[in-house]
Amino acid sequence: MKMYVIASILTITLAGCSGKSKEPLYLDANQPVEKRVNDLLGRMTLQEKVAQMSQYVGIEHMKVAEKEMTLEEMKKSHAQGFYPNLHSSELIEMTKSGLIGSFLHVTTTKEANLLQSYAAESRLKIPVLIGIDAIHGTGLYRGATIYPTPIGQAATFEPALIEKASRETALEMRATGTHWTFTPNVEVARDARWGRVGETFGEDPLLVGQMGAATVRGLQTADFTGQDKVIACAKHFIGGSQPINGINGAPCDVSDRTLHEVFMPPFKDCLDAGVFTFMMAHNEVNGVPCHVSKYLMTDVLRNRWNFDGIIVSDWMDLEQVHEKHRTAPTLKDAFVQSVNYGMDMHMHGPYFTDMIVEAVNEGLIPQKRIDDAIRAILTAKFKLGLFENPYIDEEQLTAVLFNAEHRHTALEIARKSITLLKNENNLLPIDRSKYKKIFVTGPNADNQTILGDWAFQQPDSCVTTVIEGLRNVSPQTEFNFFPFGTNLRTMEMSRVLQAKEQARKADLAIVVVGENSMRYMWQDKTCGENVDRYELSLVGLQQQLVEEIYATGVPTIVVLVNGRPLTTEWIADHIPALIEAWEPGSFGGQAIAEVLFGDVNPEGKLPMTIPRDAGQIQTYYNYKQTSKWFKYGTGKSTPLFEFGYGLNYSFFEFSPVKLSAAKMPVDGILTASVEVTNTSQVAGAEVVQMYIKDCYSSVVRPVKELKGYKKVFLNPGEKATVTFEITPKELSFYDIDMKYGVEKGEFEIMIGNSSRDVDLQKEMFEVI
Ligand code: BGC
């Protein structure tokens, strides 16, 4: 490969110039990583060390900002990479001088290779670690496979499938020159107003943790050694998913108990799966900004959990400790506090290196703290094989990117994530012989909203929109499509009425509505990072559109494409068939069409409760009894759809729960089984869910908590026995003294196909 040859010549020339025939130990790939790290560490100046802790946005990213924004705008912008008083050309020189350890937002292979070639010119030739937000596929790269967003992934209740997709993402990342993805986001999402819900796995700590751990295993495998692995990042630590007002980065006020019981376990699950990096959260928790929290970084991550990987800051958040949180009077104070408490990498920009070097020289930061940070960063670079070959072969890219296997996985996850919420009189699946003329409309029927946030615009050939999927799946049907553009806010009533007139001529109508999370459309977006809302109805005239189409009397199906729960009470009450597709990725339109026509039997289950109104928030399923003490004075008190809920075209019956014993010793094991029968004529999969309630306890416990789930596939008439093991782990919690363990007494076990009481078979047992 061309770049590699240039670099090899460069290496030989440099070795020749220095007059030494023998290469330093750290460049010898046969040496153990630890020895290589120590050897290199011993050769580094303090400035070179701290430079490894410094990350910058890619040069091309900066150039866009430099071209499109005034200096004033750049100063105010949070979204664009920019460094006032530092031009992109200066970054090249800094990289050549070994003054940058890592980049993010490098979105072309050409740039990735170029940056590595600059780094290869530095004194110690340390390659740069390139990070990217490959959240559901490496979506910031054009032409990549885009899998459903994590909220849809969670709806599959199949961690093994998510592990597979993550492994494929790692391959696509390495093929495009990136080595570190800032995923999984394992924040427990309890507030649908927060625009980032779509990049989480929903509201349940067990499901979030298992999906997060599967993502880590797929990306890193058992150990991330090798040129086809990447490192993962558990983020954002912690509490950002419970902002006081729904706004990204707003304060989180949370009890220590909830922090430990709800928010921390998924992060611990990722750590147990080997995650090598953690990202701190924008927000403060109980008054302390996460980025300078001794408690979170030193006490929990380093000391309690023995985490020795890389802690990275979020987007210029150390700067915010000084500028917004204002707990550090100067920027240097913020840097110093954070590094002292465990921060290893600064995302991103100038001043950090100089100020940290100065602080070490002044004795404000121990040299050992810096060395520990560098050890972790260099370990990653050695293990990932960057010293051996930092470059990528652009010609080999095509074999990996968007290849047949990856496309298949993306489609399979999309099929399994789609959740059927209502199907009155079995309107679905669509009977092709009855409904020959179908009217299709809605702003999300023919665009890339199906990809969700963290994806740039993809080539049209890589995306199957809903209308395209419908035409593929049912070529014999006559589809009349009425477009609405992508801007939900500027929909016109005259167009809505035109759509209504056209709908009258059809046998059936499909209306595809929801939100717009398209990252590159900052003005049009209604969902995604930094797009939070205080009410969750359909934006623009989408609700009117649905109502007008329904008013024609033509049977109407609504498909939702959205990255967070929407309050669609009227639709749930009136429209006979309702599908929640989340953001189903590259082949979302294909999967939706297959479900609509019954080629695929839907099996998705809600990973998050859907409220009737934003005022019901927080309305998660694992609430405490007193949350429902009284009813709201107006409207219903129940949510619109509960966690774990989802219909399919089959019907499953559950037998009563059978326990292996009525009593369980406090350190014992019990099994609970149910028999599930497919009593319908359609083969299908069901997610069997087990919930447990502690009947009396020293502190208030939730009405139920998910403690296990298993998916079974059953042919018509087929039965299966599903068995769960109950161990102390399933029954433990933090007691009145914050001691973790099981309290003796009665427990209720509930097994069924959603968290709704009516869907659960219940049995009691006693811990003795
Ligand atoms: C987000 C992170 C992301 C980072 C880099 C921040 O704004 O909060 O989740 O990894 O940007 O893109």
Image (spheres, rainbow, N blue to C red):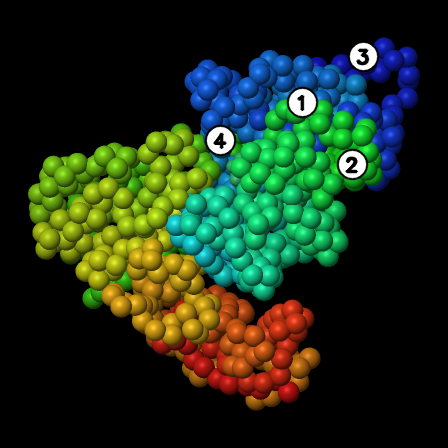
The residue shown at (44%, 59%) is 607
According to the image, label 4 marks what residue?
Answer: 78
Whether residue 194 appears in this view of the structure is: yes
What type is the residue that disc 2 sits on? Ile
The CB of the residue at mark 4 lies under 8 Å from ligand 1 = yes
Specify the label residue 13 is tagged with.
3
According to the image, label 2 marks what residue?
Answer: 365
- 533 or 375: nearer the viewer: 533
* Structural distance between the alpha carbons of marks 3 and 2: 38 Å
Q: x%, y% of residue 498? A: 11, 39
Q: Quadrant of the C terminus?
A: bottom right
The CB of the residue at mark 2 lies under 8 Å from ligand 1 = no
Q: Are marks 4 and 2 in contact (CB under 8 Å)?
A: no
Specify the label residue 116 is tagged with.
1
Q: Quadrant of the N terminus?
A: top right
Q: Are marks 1 and 2 in contact (CB under 8 Å)?
A: no
